[in-house]
Amino acid sequence: MKQLILDLHRDAPPRFDNFVSGANDALLDALHAAIGGGSHLYLWGAGGCGRTHLLHASVAAARAAGRPAIHVDAAWLGKQLNEEHGALIAVDDVDRLDDAAQIALFNAFNRARSNAHTLLLSGPCAPLGLRLREDLRTRIGQCLIYEVQDLDDASRAAILATQAGRRGLRLGDEVVDFLLRHGRRDLPALLAVLDALDQASLEHQRPITLPLLRTLMQQGLEI
Amino acid sequence: MNQDFWSFCLSRLENELPPQQFNTWIKTLSARTEDEQGEARLQLVAPNRFVLQWVRERYLRRIEELAEAFFHAPVAVELSLPPAAAARAPAAQKPVAVAVHASTEAGAAHAGGPADISVAEVEPEAAIPSADLAYEKTRLNPDFTFDTLVTGRANDLARAAAMQVAQNPGTSYNPLFVYGGVGLGKTHLIHAIGNAVYKHNPRAVIRYVHVEDYYADVVRAYQQKSFDAFKRYYRSLDLLLIDDIQFFNNKNRTQEEFFHAFNALTEARKQIVITCDTYPKDIQGLEDRLISRFDWGLTVQIEPPELEMRVAILKKKAEALRVAVDDDVAFLIAKNLRSNVRELEGALNKVVAYARFHNRGISLELAKEALKDLLNAHNRQLTIEHIQKTVADYYKIKVADMHSKKRTRVVARPRQVAMWLAKDLTPMSLPAIGEAFGGRDHTTVLHACRTIADLRQGDPQLNHDVHVLTQVLRG
């Protein structure tokens, strides 16, 4: 009999203490400085490298320190950004800003000094490769720019183990090795497989093993 | 003594404040020992102006209370910026000195509220400003002056005209119309005019405004039905610096208001300086009557800076940051970032931040490391096609051989190397890699990866090839 599962997720909210830093120590240092009013920052890296996590973590840390802070997804930016004095403003995926939103961000740059704002931006590539208005693109180029460095396999394995532990799962080394050797190694893909394994394990009331993973793959799970 | 107090203060505040607040605002302060005329003073240095302001508004009073309790005597607590930052922010340069006078029984009152302590601000907020407040209202950036502007062939005419205007506002060229591409220093130049006029005559009514903010003022005047006040304000100016006029594009009411303000100001012989990204006649969506008025004065262009000027700009900016940057480092940055000054500055900031974080001096080698991700940005998004092409070029075979069924060693080995690189350098799964190599099975890819991993142990030539290709692909 198949066990029905409630669609509940218990993932921890993105914070600095649950970000595996890998080779990103300098970036984390710069983020902490930005929360305390340092330079504007622009982070870039391929999808799944942790940009959004870091932006959310920074906004949470700024709020915890008493500073007003907002996180805006580029697609939702609209014509106007928050004007609250002293705010930390995080804008994710600047490559997806539409024309009006690009002007809103351009204005935010121009007003940042008088509004005591710090801008924290992210995108998929270095400013040289961004397809935005040139006046905005060069302003982004003036920020402190960091590439979010990819994790190595050992760090990925550690994250998988932590995430599995948080869900109360036991994930054998052979499963982790197989996933890293055989499947996509970016974090969103790995965590999606973990979700699928979690669900299947509950539904079938079987522990997570290689045979269970193979069964799921035969049923169409892509890893 | 100050250091003792500061350790005491830190430990108390660490207990009193949430950790995030403590780490963000208090831990970043540092105490400086300074005895002036035998008086006990505590000087706290904030890393930037933002922190200074924040601490002054929220925590200074508590620090004063703790100082009072610790010293049992009047103590002056000062907040200041580090020398380099202070030099770049004249408005915040003066330390805010707050003298704390002990009330008679203050020694016992440290743990209580602030009621027992009389706080007399040596330079109270309301008193400092009359000059500073007037400056604030100009919206000028004190960093942008003629002294900090590097001159070269690209901007010498514009600079000379700007200086002329700054010396004789309203009488030499009116309006002064400055145009040029993005990030070449138009805004710097008009702020420099404003700062020079202000320096010469602090009573001049000056306003720097970006066109988007001017537009916002018009909208506000509409909403609040305050057009009279709006008109009065803009017509009362001695110097109007208006930035990025191309943003007037099709904002008809804003253009209308500007047209009238323009006429009023020029008739009263008040100076207007305008910047734009193109020549007046090429501005889209702008009324002809405005365009023709822009021709009344002088139109000057700023061009992209040549290499030597870019090097000079970097040296000047480094000087402002109080860091030493050798010519070879400035040359490296200037050679790679050609089109605008903003990105030059971004690159320099990155090098400085990198050197500070790693606690190293700025050298050519360090600059290359710091800018690796910036300068190689175009090559960083590795695709499997790019890997296949690079490997095929390296082994002088055709890219089509990566997909073909041929299994001769001369083709198969490079293909295996490419598969290994795809596995190592991209997050792709084995089946996806197999698919990209002519629809091969994932076990073929797995075999290729194992083969290459084994061969690298015993075949120095292959190991060298893989190493070189990895370096090339990583940039």
Image (cartoon, grey):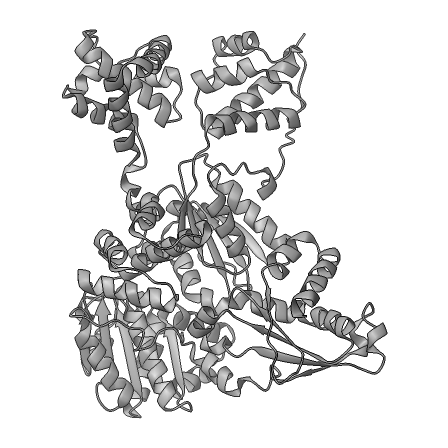
Q: Where is residue B135, by image quadrant?
A: bottom left
User: Is residue B381 placed above or below B431 in the rendered structure?
Assistant: below
Q: Residue at x 56, y 66 (%)?
A: B46
Q: Is residue B293 visible?
A: no
Q: Quadrant of residue B392?
A: top left
Q: Is residue B247 left or right of residue A87?
A: left
Residue occupying the point 49% across, 77% down: B93
Q: Is residue B115 left or right of residue A71?
A: right
In what quadrant of the picture does the N terminus of chain B appear?
Answer: bottom right
Horizontal and vertical percent for residue B43? 60, 73
Identify which residue is drawn at 57% across, 23% down.
Answer: A195
Q: In this view of the protein, which residue sits in the foreground, B413 or B380?
A: B413
Q: Nearer the viewer, residue B71 or B129?
A: B71
Q: Nearer the viewer, residue B118 or B439?
A: B118
The C terminus of chain B: image quadrant? top left
Q: Residue B292: x and y, percent?
A: 19, 78
